[in-house]
Amino acid sequence: MQSASTVFVVRPARFGFNAETAPSNSFQQSVSGLSMEDLQSQVAAEFDGVVLTLRSKGVQVLVFDDTPEPPKPDAVFPNNWLTLHADGTALLYPMCAPNRRPERRSDIVAALGAQFHIRQVHDVSAYETQGRFLEGTGSIIFDHEHRIAYACLSVRTDAELLLQVTARLGFQAVTFHAEDTHGQAIYHTNVMMCIGTRFAVICLESIPDAQERATVTASLASTGHELVAITLAQAACFAGNMLTLQPAGDGPELLALSQRAYDALTPQQCAILARYCELVPLAIPTIETIGGGSVRCMLAEVFLPRKN
């Protein structure tokens, strides 16, 4: 199954601009004139809106609270430190920024293990000491049905470590390089690419190498995905940072994305996507502006088998 029916999220306690991640994340923007109290209030309202909307659509959303100490400005993006797979594997990842590493919390893994079967925990976070990083489903876009893992290589996505992890999970890796309009490496694959069951949103113009671009395109076509090509300008509005989810019951799949991303799409692109899923725009302007990540980054999928 490509789309999870359960996700977990982390309610942030000390959200803010992260100076340690800014050098590799051109999407982050520092905002002046906003008090810390007002910032936390705005972020809390946006976070709660995401949870309430997804629950109203039939998605199970598990909420964990961030701990105030140590400060973790990016705790709202838990998909980077943990992935949870259908075979019962929980995988812990090495994070590039030192102040993000405390986001990995054994109590969250234990709480998930109380509801779901975790048969093995594979922890590769020690590669941080070697300066090698792989940041979960920020780095890796999983095509679960066809066992293919797509990744644009960057300082946050180590090629050899990617191959090690995908081999352990039984996936074939497709790697490439992607750049923004300034020629800077795109820090995470999930800001330029999203894979649904029958479609793929991708910023092809961010892949400068023609052969790599052709390889990615051919791989997606061979697995029956209709391509929705977005521009670099649209990717800058987080139009690639989407996630399909499967609601309870027999309803169509959902496509969670930010309101900014939705507004950046053309009517034609929306029409294609609407053939496959219900689009669910979520307003998180403060989180995505200051944090440099959007809706997909907030949602950590739970594919683990559920306990009876």
Image (cartoon, helix red, strand yellow):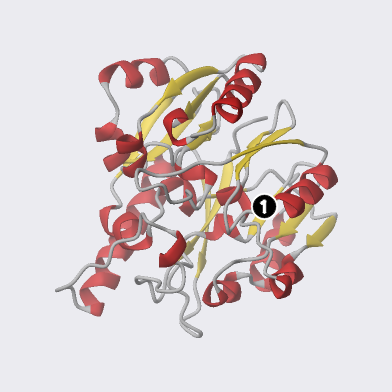
Q: Residue furthest left?
A: 33
In the rendered image, the vertical position of residue 92 relative to residue 301, given as above or below: below
Residue 125 image position (x, y, % from top left): 72, 67
Q: Is 206 displayed left or right of 225 in the figure? A: left
- Could you say which quadrant of the image residue 290 lies in? bottom left
In the rendered image, the vertical position of residue 218 relative to residue 293, given as above or below: above
Q: Is residue 111 visible?
A: yes
Report the residue at 65% width, 22% height from top.
Answer: 219
Q: Secondary structure at mark 1?
A: strand
Numbered circles on residues, count: 1
Report the residue at 77% width, 46% height from top.
Answer: 163
Residue carrying label 1: 83
Report the residue at 33% width, 59% height from top.
Answer: 287
Viewer-proximal residue among 128 and 73: 128
Q: Is 270 displayed left or right of 220 in the figure? A: left
Residue 192 image position (x, y, % from top left): 46, 39
The three-letter amino acid code for the residue at tag 1 is: Thr
Quarter of the image that includes the N terminus: top right
Viewer-proximal residue among 261 and 56: 261
Q: Is residue 308 visible?
A: no
How crowded pointer 1 is (Cα within 10 Å; few <14, some 14-19, many 20+) is rated as: many
- Could you say which quadrant of the image residue 129 lies in? bottom right
Residue 107 image position (x, y, % from top left): 66, 72
Residue 279 image position (x, y, % from top left): 38, 29
Report the residue at 21% width, 73% height from top.
Answer: 38
